[in-house]
Image: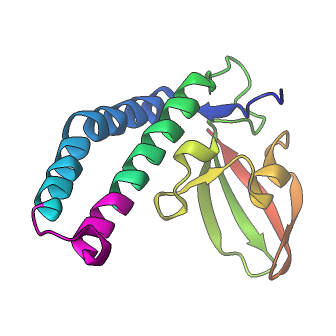
Amino acid sequence: MAEEKKHYMTEDGKRKLEEELEYLKTERRKEVVERIKIARSFGDLSENSEYDSAKEEQAFVEGRIAQIEKMIRNAVMIEEEEGSGNVVTLGKTVRFIELPDGDEEEYTIVGSAESDPAEGKISNDSPMAKSLLGKTVHDKVVVNTPAGDMELEILEIS
């Protein structure tokens, strides 16, 4: 049997997943079951779009529950490493400038379970994070992106 994928996450990321799991199990599941009951009362299930929609939603909710349970079961917690503030690792925030134009950006490298680029959190599986991991302040890094190579210089790691 293949080894299950490890899901790297912070304590905060794990807590958010646990909260979502609790919501799905205690509230969302009940709401979907109620929708199915109502849809069944409309009669013939073979032509009942409300019933089909409710069953699809039930499958989605149950799939998400299974996915979250697996992620929590295979969680590897990102620990704050003492004395390693000068090396990019999981859980670190990296501030850099794009070369040569000088645009400044900042991202925190997290596990894929809690990545949210709009919030400045990128997955450790992303091309940018893979290029940054293990680097230090003032390192110049080339990131291979679908839009072409991008050169960065690391300004700060926190």
Q: How is the image coloured?
A: rainbow
User: Magenta region, mostly helix, strand or loop?
Assistant: helix
Q: Residue at x 46, y 58 (%)?
A: 119
Q: How many marks?
A: 0
Left or right: 151 in relation to 157: right
Picture layout, residue 32 above or below residue 11 = below
Q: Can you tell which quarter of the image residue 77 is in? A: top right
Quadrant holding the N terminus: top right
Left or right: 62 in relation to 78: left
Quadrant holding the C terminus: top right
* Residue 77 visible (yes or no): no
Q: Could you tell me residue 137's position as x and y percent?
A: 79, 45
25 or 55: nearer the viewer? 55
Q: Residue at x 31, y 68 (%)?
A: 53
138 or 64: nearer the viewer? 64
- What range is drawn magenta here? 41-56
Q: Residue at x 53, y 40 (%)?
A: 67
Picture layout, residue 79 above or below residue 38 = above
Q: Residue at x 74, y 30 (%)?
A: 4
Q: Could you tell me residue 127's position as x and y percent?
A: 80, 60
Q: Can you tell which quarter of the image residue 74 is in? A: top right
Is residue 51 inside the magenta stretch?
Answer: yes
Left or right: 63 in relation to 37: right
Q: Can you tell which quarter of the image residue 101 is in? A: bottom right
